[in-house]
Amino acid sequence: MKAHRAPFAGFLLLALFTNPALAASIHVLPDSPVYQIGEIITLTVYGDSEGGEDIGVWGRLVYDGVMTDTLAATQTVHTSFNGTQTWLQGHLYLEEGRAAFMNQITPVGLTAVPVDQPQIATVTLRARRVGVVNVEFDDDLWFFGFDPDLAIGTSFTIVTGTMLIETPRAVPEPSTGGLLGLGLLAIALRQRRSA
């Protein structure tokens, strides 16, 4: 009987001291599944700290830099304590095939604090070449204890922008000039035979 109580007691203690509600989440979505060459692509990153606390946030998206041009990135400016403390923003580094979408630290030094709002960030790209582009979170993702190995990326497709539309071939109708010419030729031949 005691052999069964020990694992149960350990599970009960684990359940009491862990809070599944404080599991941060983060994901990325494109504004469309398909783009034409030259079109602007907006990737939106949604993150929820779920009440967790941290001293900073950092994240970068990785994608095919040959098929896209990196144009810009924006991030939500975090606040804490009902807007009384604004987090300090760092530079959002943009490279071919990579874009930082969040880079902030708390204004209170190395003290972990919660944020008042979810993380909403955008990365803007331009479609350059045809194919499927996979977007992933870089391994150095730092977001309220979220495990980067659990981050799920997204993908989108770039097409040429030229659509092949087959139109049925029109059947040519006899033209009035052709009929008139045939009629005149018939009259001329008839007159020759009679002469």
Image (cartoon, rainbow, N blue to C red):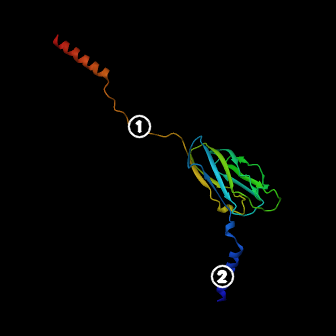
Question: In the figure, 16 relative to 153: above or below?
Answer: below
Question: In the figure, 152 relative to 164: above or below?
Answer: below
**In-image side of 190 versus 154 (left or right):** left
Q: Nearer the viewer, mark 1 or mark 2?
A: 2
- In percent of width and height, residue 121 lies at 68, 51
Residue 147 sits in quarter = bottom right
Q: Which residue is depicted at the point 22% across and 16% down?
A: 187
Question: In the figure, 12 relative to 23: above or below?
Answer: below
Q: Which residue is depicted at the point 22% across and 18% down?
A: 186
What's under tag 2, amino acid-wise? Phe
N-terminal label among 1 and 2: 2
Q: Residues within 10 Å of mark 2 (few under 14, many from 20)?
A: few
Tag count in the figure? 2
Q: Residue furthest left?
A: 194
- In percent of width and height, residue 110 lies at 82, 61
Q: Residue furthest top?
A: 195
The quadrant of the rendering that contains the C terminus is top left
Q: Nearer the viewer, residue 60 or 75?
A: 75
**In-image side of 180 versus 28 (left or right):** left
Which residue is tagged 2?
Answer: 8
Numbered disc 2: secondary structure: helix
The quadrant of the rendering that contains the N terminus is bottom right
**In-image side of 98 versus 90 (left or right):** left
Q: Residues within 10 Å of mark 1 (few under 14, many from 20)?
A: few
- In percent of width and height, residue 162 lies at 51, 39
Numbered disc 1: secondary structure: loop
Which residue is tagged 1?
Answer: 167
